Image: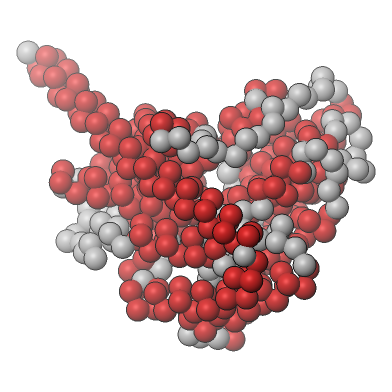
Amino acid sequence: MPSELSLHAWLGRAARWFGLATAVGVVAGVAAAGFLVALAHATAWREGHAWIIALLPVAGFAIGLLYHWAGAPVAGGLHLVFAEVQAPTRVLPRRLAPMILASTVVTHLFGGSAGREGTAVQMGAALADQVGRPFALVGRDRRLLVLAGIAGGFGAVFGTPLAGTVFALEVVAVGALGRIAVVPCLIAALVGHLVVRGLGVEHTPYPMIEVPAISVMLVLTLVAAGGVCGVVARAFVAAQHAVQAIAERAIGWMPLRLAAGGALVALAVYSLGSTRHIGLSIPLMLDAFAAPRPASDCVLKLALTALTLGCGFKGGEVTPLFVIGATLGSALSAIMPGPGVAVLAAVGLVAVFAGAARTPLTCVVLAVELFGIDLALPAAIACSASWAIAGRVGIYAPRAMPPVLEPGPGTNA
């Protein structure tokens, strides 16, 4: 009888978590789909009306006012989300999802250089917390649900459910929590991805990469390329942190700081006479697979992204890191022997992200989902080298896991 009761309890808990993870995947997928559509329209409108970039300082001022007046509970962004998984204290505020969505779309519409994963992950986590509210989840259960929201958001926005799962586990979860979180995270990420596809929203098409036979020369080339990617990843993190420190020290009031940063970005874009290095820069990234790109593409995307995000505009770092890595690998193909431009661009895309985010396992899985299984070993070699060179400081919060306490009464503004 005890065993039957235990089996019944286990089946009930499994069914409950399957339903919760599925619900999280649905809301994360719907949010990601709407976000992707909004980004596509914002990008298309900006490219057809380049004069709007001159208003980036005004947009920055507006975003700053929004967060100054109403955004204090959510100003931590991804750091707030990760902290709630590590040591839960309160339900993530309802305003987190709409505020990060609106501010990110505005950033892209007016010409900032930013990404999208930070927004998708924050929306997924915040919506997951709302899904769990009627069930009064606390402690480990609530951490698991928010973690599933992180996986669902990442997997849905990039169309990579396996990478979304590994990302959530590698960035935030450690120990026993990581082991038991695999299934909820995978369900949420897979459902989120399927929802986006079911709604007819298309992801960026990446080429399938054919890799030459493994040889000593190829391995050495991949190690060298990965090392360079690690240096660039380290430079990106340092640049973003430096811009943030200088901006906060020079201009204490957030709205004015964003306005000044927007003016600098707009001035740089008009000076360059090109919009290829702002927004997501997807066309620039895809061009990197076809023919070697100049190293200046990598440098300009790095500088504009560090300036945009360092001054406080919203978005994410991952897609810009993809572009930085792809253009870097493309440029390296002109001077490195072996695999050719497409392979090095693909390897660079994941290796710079691996070094900057400290997520080599995520990036190997990402390489397989984006480019095919043939890139698994080259990606593993390059991502390992990048991770080793990039240093201990990354774009996300430190992952030291504090003791987990049961949450007290929380707020949910």
Residue 392, percent across and down? 62, 55
Task: State the residue in front, 197 or 84.
Answer: 197
Q: In which quadrant is the C terminus drawn?
A: bottom left
- Figure check: 252 above or below 161: below
Task: State the residue in front, 185 or 285.
Answer: 285
The residue at 39%/74% (across/down) is 66
- In the rendered structure, the answer to whether residue 31 lies left or right of residue 350 reads left
Residue 328, percent across and down? 78, 49
- In the rendered structure, the answer to whether residue 333 lies left or right of residue 278 reads right
The residue at 71%/42% (across/down) is 286
- Figure check: 395 above or below 262: above
Check the image and name the residue furthest to the left: 1
Check the image and name the residue furthest to the front: 48
The residue at 22%/53% (across/down) is 406
- Residue 149 quadrant: top left
Residue 398, percent across and down? 50, 57
Residue 252, percent across and down? 51, 85
The residue at 35%/60% (across/down) is 98
State whether residue 403 appears in this view.
no
State whether residue 74 appears in this view.
yes
- Figure check: 323 above or below 45: above
- Residue 224 quadrant: top right
Q: In which quadrant is the N terminus drawn?
A: top left
Q: How is the image coloured?
A: secondary structure
Q: How many marks?
A: 0
